[in-house]
Image: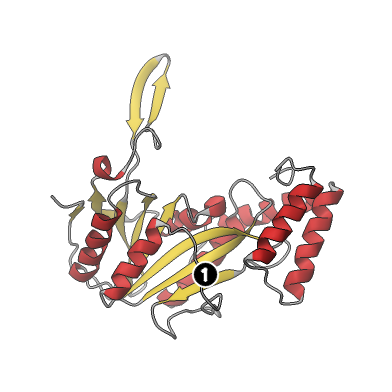
Amino acid sequence: MSLLDLREPPDLVAPLLVASFDGWVDAGAAATAAAARLAEGAETIGTFDADRLYDYRARRPTLEIEDGRPDRLTWPELTLRRARFGERDLLVLSGPEPDFRWRELERAAVDLARRLEVAAWISLGAIPAAVPHTRPVTILGTESHPGLLRGGVTAGPSGVLRVPSAAISVLDLAVSRAGVPAVGYYAQIPHYLTGDYPPASVELLRLVGEHLGQELAMGELRDDARRVLARLDTATAAEATTRAHVERLEAMVDEARRPAGDDLITEIERFLRDQGGSGERAPGT
C-alpha cells in the first residue's frame, strides 16, 4: 500500500519541487511560512497517508468546540500542491515532519519525482544560529553537485558537519541519488528569538524566485518582517545584556567571522550565563 495518493496533473512544464516540514529545521517557522505563501491558491494533487506517518499523541488533531458542542477536527496532513508561476510549474510538498516510516517516505519521494519528471528539488529550512537580527539573513546552502545554488548562496560550511538529520534531508539525499538535481536553502535565525521570523521567509522566497526566474509576490510577509524587526530593535535597546550580546554578534558578522560549531556553542553559553542561566529569550519576541 503506497504512502502517497497521487493524482497526476496534465501538462506539467519542467516542474520544480519545493519541500518544507515543520519541526527540526524550521526555526521561526521561516521555511513553512515560505512554503505556505507559495502554495496559496494551489490545487492539491497528492495526499499522504497521515495515519501511517504521524503519532497523534505528539501531533494531536485540533478540536473546535462551538458553544459547548464539539464541532470539527483538523488532522495533521502532508500534501503535494501544484501552482503555476509564469511558464513554470511549482510543486509544494509541505506539512508536519512525519514521525514514522521515513524510509518508505523517501521511496515515495523518489517515485513522485520520477513520475512527475521533477526538474529540480528545493529543500527549505531554518536553523538557530549565532547571528544578529540587525543584519541581512544568512543562508546556508547545500547542493547535489556544484553550480546549482542561486542568488549568491554558496555551499557550506566547509569540512565535515555531523548533525541529527531532519526528514527533509532524508528526502533530499534520496532524490539526488536518484538523479534529480537537489539544493537546500537553510536560513540562519538569531538563536535568542522566539516566535515567527518572517525576514527569513522573505529571503527564502527570494531564492525560490531565482530558480523560477521571477520575483515572487510576498503578500504581507514584508510588512510582517518590518514589524518584527522594529519590535526586536525596541526590545534589544531596552535590555543591556541582550544589547551587548547582539553587538558581539554584529562584530562577528561584520568581520566575516561566521560562527560555527564550538564558536556557536560558546557564544550561546555566554549569553545564557549573562542572563543568569535562565534561558530566557529576548523580551518582546
Toward the viewer: 137 or 40? Answer: 137
How far from the left and from the top, in percent, is residue 250?
77, 66
Q: Decide if residue 216 is on the left or right side of residue 263.
A: left
Residue farthest to the bottom?
147
Estimate the x, y position of residue 181 in percent, counting from the top left: 34, 77
Residue receiving disc 1: 161
The one of 66 and 143 positioned closer to us in this rendering: 143
Task: Determine if residue 175 is in view.
Answer: yes
Using a 10 Å C-alpha cutoff, classify the residue at mark 1 as few (fewer than 14 neighbours), some (14 to 19) or many (20 or more). few
Residue sitting at x 31%, y 47%: 100
Callout 1: SS:
loop
Q: Position of residue 212 (x, y in %)?
A: 41, 74
Mark 1: amino acid: Leu
Q: Quadrant of residue 19?
A: bottom left
Residue ID at (23%, 55%): 104
Query: In the image, is residue 197 above or below residue 124?
Result: above
> Residue 220: in sight, yes or no?
no
Name the residue located 22 percent from the left edge and 64 percent from the top edge: 112
The residue closer to the viewer here, 30 or 273, is 273
Indicate left or right for 251 with 223 as reference.
Answer: right
In the rendered image, the residue lying farthest to the left is: 1
* Residue 199, image x, y percentages: 61, 59
